[in-house]
Image: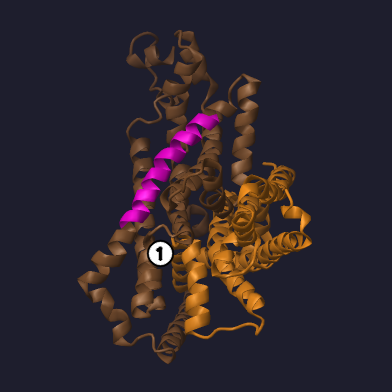
Chain colours: A orange, B brown
């Protein structure tokens, strides 16, 4: 009962969720940018770029995120000495962001590519007919329509990203799942309460997010 | 897929061909430079040294670490797949039930487990449930139950969407020949939903297989635990071991995806869409003369 009466536990819980939100925010931006670039590569007329995009997607989509995060820490940091900050949690945070965005970008790329495929061929043909180049066609005509078609899948990817960010706990960041594990280990008989608080917080955050993206997707859908 | 891709740019003329060739060379060189840079980084960190890679040429590495780990991964994945498919069908049907006392709890369970991170559930099952049941929970069951609850909920939503997408005429016809609700669900709706949602289902099974790697956190000896963590503890070759494990995961998941594509093509060509036959325009035959007229009426 007194788990959440102790201010230290409350602080740890709050800071765990703050880490989750920070991880999600930074990785979402990076993954979106990277994913759009990869999608553009995958539909470009240049075979090398198509190969690169396809390779990225096939490698990172089929590797467990746990392994990618593991590699970011023990490979990039421990072996290759890639370091962002002398502050250990902050360094772990950025390593986690790299792993999360590398992985998520593969899914964003595939979502956007399937969005590009929903744009009727006539749109791109018309754009070409008025003399737009490939980059212009993609930027002015195709991607804006594709973007509206993929709001719902991107929403699911964002939700998955938020949940996946707990995996950064495996390389030692005190995000919410690690905080929960420690609390359960110290207050074993309050395990159900602790789980209810943590899981409830995720549910309260993510279920409305899911409905919001569903609503947004409906609103933005291109009426054809 | 490729039809939009090909209309995004014109068939290249002479100038475009030159430009594409130049860009190909430029990006090709950039890619090679990137690979070279990675190679140099490996070299600088001494990662090409033979004794880091030699373990993979010895049978003991495979029989002692990688293969047992792979087997444990596949066991957890297989159990998780069976249970989560069952969970998915049961809760999809439950959520579509006409009885609110079934559909509302089923919906709440599905929404809840879809929103909670898998790691949180695995920790709860592994660390907190033993206090409740006064018995230890093994890493295997922590992983399998966690995977089942999460992926089962995702699959439940996929099945539900699939069942709702089955044309209404199918269930109406089934009711008309006297089938009860359970029978309609079992024999008419679920099989068609499973078939139409096959790509979604398989991609979720790939997710499930990848998520077994979380077993590493509760000391379940799967591929990441045995093949990367334990192996590198013995030989000090984290990077090499992680690359080998990643290649194994990529091969297995690609095989699963290929299997899904093959099943999808097979069910398309093997008259999987039987109702469509009646819709295809029949060759003009005199009324009541050919078989086409029988199908049409």
Would residue A130 be visible to someone looking at this image? no
Q: Which residue is mark 1?
A: B225
What secondary structure characterizes most of the magenta part?
helix
Q: How many marks?
A: 1
Position of the C terminus of chain B by quadrant: top left
x and y percentages locating residue A171 in the rendered image: 55, 70
Name the one closer to the observer, A116 or B89: B89
Q: Which residues are magenta?
A: B71-92
Helix, strand or loop status at disc 1:
helix
Name the one closer to the observer, B245 or B204: B245
Chain under label 1? B
Q: Is residue B199 above or below residue B72?
A: above
Name the one closer to the observer, B30 or A188: A188
x and y percentages locating residue B259 in the rendered image: 34, 48
Q: Is residue A51 above or below residue A141?
A: below
Name the one closer to the observer, B41 or A123: B41
Q: Residues within 10 Å of mark 1 (few under 14, many from 20)?
A: many
């Amino acid at each position: 009962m007194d788990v959440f009466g102790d201010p230290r536990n409350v602080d740890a819980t709050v800071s765990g969720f703050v880490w989750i939100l920070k991880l999600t925010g930074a990785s979402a931006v990076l993954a979106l940018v990277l994913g759009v670039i990869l999608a553009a590569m995958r539909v470009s007329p240049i075979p090398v770029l198509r190969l690169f995009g396809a390779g990225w997607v096939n490698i990172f989509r089929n590797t467990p995120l746990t392994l990618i995060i593991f590699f970011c820490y023990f490979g990039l940091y421990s072996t290759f000495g890639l370091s962002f900050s002398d502050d250990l949690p902050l360094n772990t945070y950025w390593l986690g962001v790299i792993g999360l965005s590398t992985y998520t970008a593969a899914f964003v790329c595939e979502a956007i590519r399937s969005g590009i495929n929903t744009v009727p061929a006539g749109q791109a043909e018309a754009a070409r007919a008025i003399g737009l180049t490939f980059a212009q066609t993609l930027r002015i005509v195709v991607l804006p329509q594709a973007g509206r078609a993929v709001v719902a899948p991107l929403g699911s990817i964002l939700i998955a990203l938020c949940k996946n960010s707990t995996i950064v706990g495996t390389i030692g960041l005190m995000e919410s799942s690690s905080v929960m594990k420690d609390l359960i280990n110290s207050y074993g008989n309050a395990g159900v309460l602790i789980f209810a608080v943590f899981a409830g917080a995720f549910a309260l955050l993510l279920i409305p997010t899911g409905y919001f993206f569903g609503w947004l997707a409906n609103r933005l859908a291109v009426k054809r | 897929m490729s039809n939009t891709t090909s209309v995004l740019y014109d068939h290249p003329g002479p100038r475009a061909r030159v430009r594409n060739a130049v860009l190909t060379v430029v990006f090709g060189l950039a890619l090679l430079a990137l690979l070279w840079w990675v190679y140099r980084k490996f070299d600088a960190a001494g990662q090409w040294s033979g004794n880091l890679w030699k373990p993979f040429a010895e049978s003991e590495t495979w029989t002692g670490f990688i293969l047992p780990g792979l087997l444990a991964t596949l066991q957890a994945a297989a159990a998780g797949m069976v249970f989560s498919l069952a969970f998915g069908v049961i809760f999809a049907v439950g959520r579509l039930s006409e009885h609110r006392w079934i559909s509302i709890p089923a919906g709440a369970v599905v929404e809840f487990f879809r929103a909670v991170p898998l790691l949180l559930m695995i920790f709860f099952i592994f660390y907190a449930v033993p206090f409740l049941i006064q018995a230890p929970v093994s890493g295997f069951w922590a992983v399998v139950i966690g995977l089942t609850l999460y992926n089962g909920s995702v699959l439940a939503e996929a099945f539900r969407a699939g069942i709702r997408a089955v044309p209404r005429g199918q269930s109406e016809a089934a009711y008309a020949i006297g089938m009860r609700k359970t029978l309609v669900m079992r024999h008419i709706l679920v099989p068609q939903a499973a078939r139409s949602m096959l790509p979604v289902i398989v991609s979720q099974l790939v997710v499930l297989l990848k998520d077994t790697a979380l077993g590493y956190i509760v000391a379940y000896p799967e591929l990441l635990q045995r093949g990367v963590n334990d192996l590198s503890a013995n030989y000090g070759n984290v990077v090499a071991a992680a690359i080998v494990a990643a290649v194994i995961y990529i091969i297995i998941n690609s095989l699963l995806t290929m299997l899904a594509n093959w099943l999808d093509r097979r069910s398309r060509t093997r008259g999987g869409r039987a109702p469509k036959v009646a819709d295809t325009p029949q060759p003009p035959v005199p009324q009541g003369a050919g078989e086409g007229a029988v199908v049409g009426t």
